[in-house]
Amino acid sequence: MSITAKQLAKELGLSEAAVSMALNNKTGVSATTRRMVIKAAQDKGYDFSRIKEKQERLGSVHVVFYRTHNAILSYAPIFDELYDGIRSVCQKSHVISHVIHFYEKTDDLEMYFGDIRTSDCCGIILVGTELRKEICLRFLSLGLPVVLLDTYFDSVSCNCILINNQQGAYLATDFLISRYHAQPGYLKSSYSIPNFEERRNGYFRAIKENGMSSSRSIIHELAPSIEDATADMLAVIDNHDPLARCYFADNDMIAIGAIKALKARGYKIPDDVAIIGFDNIAESRIIEPALTTMDVPRFSIGETAAEVLLSQIRSADLYYRKIEISTSMELRGSH
């Protein structure tokens, strides 16, 4: 005879309410307690069919875009594509998805958490492009299934979906080396996020694996927006700083800003200076010449995040995954 929830609560020294919340993926218990209850239930033969019907009637999924300085998330089209992928999967599963734009400087996180606790929220996709680890841990403390999108923390236990940033930067840099037989420069974002750190690592790995010295890399720090990157690159040129024959840029906005500045000072792209960006934003197809860039399959990334979250909600997975989605090069005219 299978163990009951009441017996399970007694054996674990927990309240019946706590065991019920854990088994039904409700808020009110920590992620650690939830995992402990589910593992004990599996080990002791608990009949999960008792709650299967309830689990099929899922609540809503919250897609939280957490903004700190808004330096990256201000470019809406990238994240619209992510959400389109999330919404597509949710709709197929008859799950409602809600977009939450949270601004750290003006919004109250505890107030938002209070709203979640009284809502039908069954899981969260946390877009963590600008997120700090301590904020991620606060979301996990809700006890709800959470999928972290677009960032990763080694010491945080949750499912993570992210771009393979290092691979993309490596491919772009290696391509430039093979094409120009010269050491590429690096257009580095002046605003640091984990994605850019990974791209930096990919750039330097390609430099080293091609037998070049990292200390000889020409690096310019530019703001990660088109207008500000243009101004920063104009200052570099007007200061007569040395320029590289070719560059890898942390993102397309930096690359486009650099192209605008170089063209304004009479340089020809790619005859004088070649540039490869990262992200494949719409503007990369409009600039003249069109920007060669690393394409990120954002719709597919959103789909993957939603599939992982719904799987976690339905099956109460005990183990977490880090899934990296590869990029591919979109060849245009700037290389």
Image (cartoon, rainbow, N blue to C red):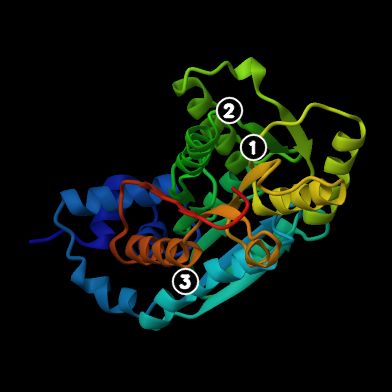
Proximity of marks 2 and 3: CB atoms separated by less than 8 Å: no
- Give the alpha-carbon distance from disc 3 to disc 1, as whole Å: 34 Å
The residue closer to the viewer here, 17 or 287, is 287
Of 289 and 214, nearer the camera is 289
Please name which of the two marks, 3 or 1, marks the residue nearer to the observer.
Answer: 1
User: Residue 105 at x, y = what percent?
Assistant: 82, 54
Hey, which quadrant is residue 80 in on the image? bottom right
The reply to whether the C-beta atoms of the residues labelled 2 and 1 are less than 8 Å apart is yes
Given residues 121 and 327, the one toward you in this image is 327
Identified at 54% across, 46% down, the residue is 151
Q: Position of residue 275 (x, y in %)?
A: 64, 45
Mark 3: few, some, or many residues within 10 Å (few <14, many ≥20)?
many
Q: Which residue is mark 1?
A: 246
Number of numbered callouts drawn: 3
Amino acid at pointer 3: Gly
Residue 21 percent coordinates (x, y): 41, 62
Q: Quadrant of residue 243?
A: top right
Let me know if residue 267 appears in the view.
yes
Marks 2 and 1 sit apart, C-alpha to C-alpha, by 8 Å
Q: Circle 2 — which element?
A: loop
Reply above or below: 186 against 33: above
Residue occupied by mark 3: 85
Residue designated by label 2: 182
Q: Amino acid at mark 1?
A: Cys
In space, the residues marked 2 and 3 are separated at their CA atoms by 39 Å
Locate residue 293 relative to residue 316 in the image: left or right. right
Q: Where in the figure is residue 10, as x and y percent of width and height? A: 29, 51
Which is more N-terminal, label 1 or label 2?
2
Task: Give the mark, 2 or 3, whose residue is nearer the N terminus.
Answer: 3
Q: Is residue 47 above or below residue 161?
A: below
Instruction: Identify residue type, mark 2.
Output: Ala
Q: Is residue 162 above or below residue 56?
A: above
